[in-house]
């Protein structure tokens, strides 16, 4: 691949890498303590939005690659997060506009975050099984997708991790996925037949 080329896949990977550390930065701003939705300030809202935008770009890249499989099931699995992540991104707008957290639309955007994480985990398993991404890149979606399930398992076991771990894990996972997309060699395309 020409390193100067700005293919759509490279741009999606770059966006994912840029957005990856946003949750870690936001938690660091608050001393790695949990902040209630009602207390989210404009900078925090924008950081959450930046992360969600990078996340969307990563999932769009996987969808375009048909990384979960070329069949209908694989395409549908990678499409679902592309429907829920924009809802999660909508929470940024709600926070900026100071919409009450009890508002029904706010509740929808709030639920879209964990739902999108669950869907990302489902996609990551499908990508792993489909084997369409080469080498180490095949594991990067799982590094992202396992964030929420791993946190829930640890909570169920009564294991409390330091406040920075979730932000660090998402920063690492989404950066790795963005890098996988950014460095992926495009498949050669055959020239289109011409009418002689």
Image: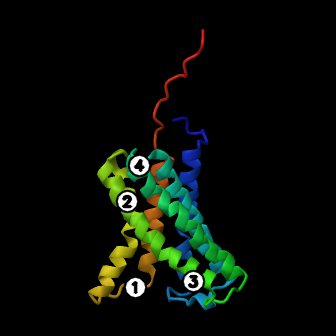
User: Residue under circle 4?
Assistant: 72
Q: Mark 2 or 1, which is nearer the eye?
A: 2
Residue located beneath label 1 in the image: 162
**Residue 131, above or below 17:** above
Assess disc 4: are there few (<14), some (14-19) or many (≥20) residues with their C-alpha within 10 Å of its C-alpha: few
State which quarter of the image contains the C terminus. Answer: top right
> Compared to 13, does 32 lie above or below?
below
Label 4 to label 2: alpha-carbon separation: 16 Å
The colour scheme applied to this rendered structure is: rainbow
Instruction: Judge left or right: residue 12 versus residue 145.
Output: right
Crowdedness of circle 3 by 10 Å Cα count: few (<14), some, many (20+)? Answer: few
User: Residue sitting at 56 percent across and 79 percent down?
Assistant: 108
Q: Which residue is mark 3?
A: 107
Residue that sits furthest to the right in the current view = 97
Residue at the left extreme of this rendering? 157
Across and down, in percent, residue 195 comes to: 60, 13
For the residues bearing labels 2 and 3, Cβ distance under 8 angstroms = no
Q: Which mark is residue 86?
A: none
Q: Position of residue 92 (x, y in %)?
A: 64, 76
Q: How many marks?
A: 4
The residue that appears at 37% across and 59% down in the rendered structure is 124
Residue that badge 2 annotates: 124
Q: Mark 1 or mark 4, which is nearer the start of the sequence?
A: 4
């Amino acid at each position: 691949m020409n390193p100067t080329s700005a293919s759509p896949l490279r741009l999606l990977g770059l966006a994912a890498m840029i957005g990856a550390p946003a949750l870690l930065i936001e938690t660091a701003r608050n001393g790695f303590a949990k902040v209630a939705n009602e207390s989210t300030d404009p900078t925090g809202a924008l950081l959450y939005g930046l992360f969600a935008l990078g996340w969307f770009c990563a999932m769009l890249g996987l969808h375009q690659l048909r990384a979960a499989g070329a069949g209908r099931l694989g395409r549908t699995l990678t499409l679902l997060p592309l429907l829920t992540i924009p809802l999660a991104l909508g929470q940024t707008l709600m926070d900026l506009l100071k919409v009450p957290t009890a508002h029904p639309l706010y509740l929808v955007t709030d639920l879209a975050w964990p739902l999108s994480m669950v869907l990302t985990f489902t996609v990551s398993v499908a990508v792993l099984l489909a084997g369409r991404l080469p080498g180490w890149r095949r594991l990067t979606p799982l590094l992202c997708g396992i964030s929420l399930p791993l946190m829930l398992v640890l909570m169920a076991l009564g294991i409390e991790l330091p406040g920075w771990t979730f932000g660090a894990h998402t920063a690492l996972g989404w950066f790795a996925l963005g890098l996988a997309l950014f460095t992926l060699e495009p498949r050669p395309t055959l020239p289109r037949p011409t009418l002689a």
